[in-house]
Structure formats: structure tokens, C-alpha cells
Amino acid sequence: MDWGKLPDVGAVALLTCAFASVARRGFTAVSGLWLTGWLLIELHFAALMFLSSSGELGAVASFIALAALVWAGVTFMWACVPFRSELSSRWMIAAVIGTNTLYIGLLTFAPTGYWAFVPAALLVGILPFAIALFTIRTFNHPLRWSAVSLFGGLSAFLLAVQNQPGNGPELALNAVFFTVYFGCGIHFWYTYRRATTGALITIAGFLAWSAVFVIGPSINAFFPALHPESEVWNLPKYVVAVGMILLLLESQIEHNKFLALHDELTGLPNRRLFQDRLAGALERAHRTGKQTALLLVDLDRFKQVNDTAGHHVGDLLLKRVGEIFQGRIRRSDTVARTGGDEFSVILEDPTCRADAERVGHSLIQLLNEPLDLDGHTVRVGASVGIAVYPDDALSAESLCIAADRRMYSDKNATRSDEIVEAGCAGLPEPFPPMSETPRGIKRRRLEPSSLSSPAK
């Protein structure tokens, strides 16, 4: 047993534990794959301790060490694929792992020049290409073709060097590792195209890791008297580990920032962000002499949905309402969840009172439609209050008060209509027909003079 590898085993184990500790606080499918990759790197170093064993044990340890290094790299690549749920992507990852593992097995156990090397090298490039070509009509992505190109080039290189006398198998093995870890660098660059410390360190680490399998053989070939310390070749691994930990921490910080300004259930801006955006909208309107409209929308029968169908359906209802509102307003406007069942909408320039009333009317119509939520069909309806800057108020607080008063006036009018309709059910109609205005839209328009004077 080679005890000289024990420090590497311990160092990778400590880094893996640190990585697992950070990942546990915000565990995702990606961080789980990264953790799996580092466990495979740990297996790689553990197997290297038995490399000097004689007989079959040494051969098996060599195969496990080499295969684990490839499996780890492919796992890191797989973690960056945004379409992992695609069936063809699973075929692709199985093809890459299977063909490269087969080739490493031949390098470990088969004699040089064995006939199976040629078909194994062909499979490394042909099988991923065939899968990509066969599924191109149903799915296509640049990352897939980058992987196909990488392993196609690897296949051609293996055919060229694998039967070369002397160092042919060594060149072939280093080519496999270079391709896998250079592919990791490409995949991480595509997925984390942002100028953060974690992204830059991780991408640079993978590129350095892949360069090890080119620089090392080059030094042996052209500078045989130069013998760098073996630990130098392991430095890129630790750089990648540190970069990944930083990426996790950066993601957690961004997530915490998002939660501080957004509603966790719906993902919409919360009251804090809504107030900031409303203040900004009013300042822009004041500077340009334009109008800004505020809509407060309150669901009518949300408590009834919670009581009869359960809070799970109530949560689904709030998410659906948020999606409906986001699909109706412009991207330049803001929809926020500012209360339990209350949503607020900011309509910026170009807008006017008529535009705001049309938007409010359409939102109420959408909420009057039945919604299918987890097998429950619910009808909620809503009441809306509209206030326009600068006609109704000159400050954010006064505008919210004006919209809130109109919203409750609309809600009270809706309840009165429901009571009248219930009392007159089945009787001859003693009153003139009611207005065709859909329930939930205000029956009368309150003029600014009916409100308290706007704040100066």
C-alpha cells in the first residue's frame, strides 16, 4: 500500500466534508451531483493507495482509480446540463460513461494492440453523435453538440495514437482525461457566464486540470530531466473545489437577497420591494409629467377556499393568481403580493385612468373564471381599487390609501349586490335590470374630491 497518497486522501476528504456542509444549507440537484463528483475523486485517491499491489488487486485498483477520475469529470459536466430530464440526455450521459469506461478497461486489462481497441475508440465518438443525430428533431442544444465534437475529436485521436509503440496507451489515456475535464471547463463556462469569483476560479481550475494531461506528457517527452513534484499536478483539483464552494456560497447569498425582496410562495415582489418601486415610479412620473396608476386587488373568497379545500389549495391559488397577473401586465410594470390575499399592480407610463380601469376589468374577469387546482375547481373573484398619480394623490402613502378605500368600496358594493340577488331569487323582478358591468368591477367612480385631500 502506498501511504504517500494518504495526505491527498485526507485533503480531498476534508474538502468534500466542507463542500457537503455548505451544500446542505441550500441543497439542490446540482450541488448533489457536485458532491457525488467529489466522492468519486476521493475514491480515485483511495484506489491509488493500492496501485502498487501485485497481481489482480493492483490491476483492479488501477482501473478503479482511472475510471473514478473519468466518472467524476462526466458527473461535473452532467451537473451543468440544463436539460437533464430529457430522455435523450440520459442516453447521452450513459453513452459517454459507458464508452469511456470500456476504453479505460481495455487500457488496464487488455494487451497492447488488442483488436477491441479499434471498435472501442470508434464507439467513443460514434455513439454520442448517433444519439444527437437521432434525436435532433425533438431536442437540440449547443452544449450537446459541443460534447459530441469533443468526443468525436477524442475518438479520432485515439485511433491515431493507441497503437503507437512505447507511449501510445499513455497518450490515449491522457487524451481521455483531457477531453473530459476540458469539457467540464466548457460546460461551466456556458452555465456560469458571470464575472464572479466562484465562477472564474472554477472555470480556470477545470482548464488547468485538463492542461495537466497535456503538460505532464510534454515535460516527460521534451524535458526528461525535469521532475516536478507530484503534488503540483493535484493543485487544479483543489482550485476547482474552492471555486465550487464559492459558487455555492454566492448562490445562497443571491437566494437570501431574493427572499428579502420577494414573496417566497409566489416569487413576486413583496411589500418592501413594492414600496421601493412605487416610490421610483412616482418620481419618474413627477419628473416627466406623466401619470402612474396603482391597482389594489383583493381576492373575495380566499378564506372560503382555505377552509373548504385546505391551505395547500390556497397556496396553489395564490401562485396561480400571481401567474395570471404577470401574464396580463407589461414587463415594464410591477405586480406584487402585498398581503395575505392582496396583490398590488403599478402601471407606469404610458398609462391613464382609462387604461388602468381596462387592466382592472380584465384582471377581475380572469379571476371570475373557474380555476382547476389539484383536482379542485374554485371560483374566487376579486375587488379592485384604482388610484392615479397625480390626480388622486401626490405621495406613495396617499396613493395607497386612495386605492385601498376604493377597493373596499368596491368590495362592499359587491356584497350588497350578492345580498339583493339572493333575496330576490325566484321572485318577479321588481327592479330595473342591473348594469352589465361584471361583478367585482366598481359600480361607480369616486372622484378625487370624495377623498381626503392629497398629501402636499
Image (cartoon, grey):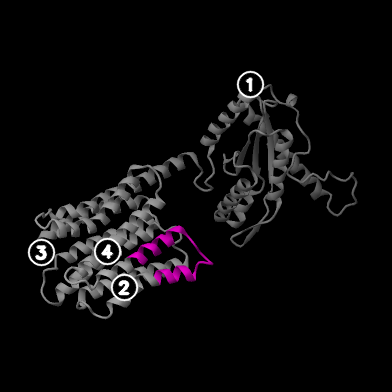
Please report the residue visible at 61 percent of the width from the left and 62 percent of the height from the top. Answer: 375
Of labels 4 and 2, earlier in sequence is 2
Of labels 2 and 1, earlier in sequence is 2
Residue that mark 4 sits on: 175
Counting from the top left corner in percent of width and height, residue 90 is at: 42, 68
Of labels 3 and 1, earlier in sequence is 3
Counting from the top left corner in percent of width and height, residue 77 is at: 36, 59
Secondary structure of residue under mark 1: loop
Q: Which circle, 2 or 1, is nearer the viewer? A: 2
Residue that mark 2 sits on: 121
> Magenta region: which residues?
127-153
Counting from the top left corner in percent of width and height, residue 172 is at: 25, 67
Q: Which circle, 3 or 1, is nearer the viewer? A: 3
Residue that mark 3 sits on: 2
What's the amino acid at mark 3?
A: Asp
Q: Are marks 1 and 4 in contact (CB under 8 Å)?
A: no
Is disc 2 surrounded by few (<14), some (14 to 19) or many (20+) residues within 10 Å? many
Q: Are marks 3 and 2 in contact (CB under 8 Å)?
A: no
Of labels 4 and 3, earlier in sequence is 3
Is disc 4 surrounded by few (<14), some (14 to 19) or many (20+) residues within 10 Å? many
Residue that mark 1 sits on: 455
Please report the residue visible at 10 percent of the width from the left and 61 percent of the height from the top. Answer: 3
What's the amino acid at mark 2?
A: Ala
Magenta segment's dominant SS is helix
Quarter assignment of residue 339: top right
Question: In the rendered view, would you say 187 is above or below 402?
Answer: below
Secondary structure of residue under mark 2: helix
